Image (spheres, rainbow, N blue to C red):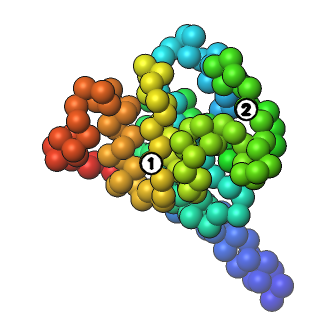
Amino acid sequence: MQKVKLLFLSGFVLIFCAHKPANNSAQIKWMDFSEVEKNQTKEKRPVLIDVYTSWCGWCKVMESKTYANRKVAEYVQGKFYPVKFNAETKDQINWEGKIYNYNSNYRCNEFALYILQGRLEFPTTVIIPMDGSQPQAIPGYLPTKDFELIAKYFGEGEFGKTPFEEYQKKFKSSW
């Protein structure tokens, strides 16, 4: 009887381990700011910054739903230099020769104040265009389909060439 139980258990374990559900998730390889600046000298790309805080529930949803999506991760990895940035970090940030420190009055890093233009909303997706112009902050949780529109607008080089409203009207989602 024990051999039958052991055989049954072994078979169950083999079947369970061999079965892998379809996985539509992937991971973005987030960079730090010094890596971005180093890579920008080799190949110019827009910078995508996921601005979050540790206490933000929607930031966690953005991480687990949008950024974990395989198509999102592959696109971001191929078209942007991605940075995950905790707005409340007390670490010093060095970006383009300027030092940003923690600001105790605002309880956030000065770099967050700069890229969010003083609007501390989380999560916020910030894109610094390839030409280095003003950071573009898109506040709030972005489901995959909304993220695709914005990512492709910048990733395909339409920012600065085509008005967003015009691009949006012609855009066809594929994710």
Which badge, 2 or 1, comes first in the chain's sequence? 2
Horizontal relation, residue 129 to residue 4: left or right: left
Residue 89 against residue 134 in the figure, above or below: below
- Tag 1: residue type? Ile
- Amino acid tagged 2: Tyr
Residue drawn at (48%, 21%) of the image: 132
Residue 22 in sight in this render = no
Residue bearing mark 1: 138
Front-most of residues 91 and 25? 91
Residue 65 percent location from the top left of the image: 51, 60
Q: Position of residue 10 (x, y in %)?
A: 73, 71
Image quadrant of residue 142?
Answer: bottom left
The circle drawn on residue 100 is 2
For label 1, the crowd category at 10 Å Cα-Cα, with few meaning under 14, some 14 to 19 and many 20 or more, is some
When the figure is inspected, residue 80 is found, relative to residue 102, above or below; the finding is above
Residue at figure coordinates x 66%, y 25% from the top left: 95
SS for tag 1?
Answer: strand
Give percent across and percent down for residue 35.
Answer: 67, 23
Q: Position of residue 117 (x, y in %)?
A: 54, 42
In the depicted view, which residue is nearer to us: 95 or 9?
95
Residue 160, picture quadrant: top left
Q: Residue at x 60, y 37 (%)?
A: 114
Quarter in which the N terminus is drawn: bottom right
Question: Disc 2 to disc 1, how far (Cα)?
Answer: 21 Å
Tag 2–tag 1 contact (CB < 8 Å): no
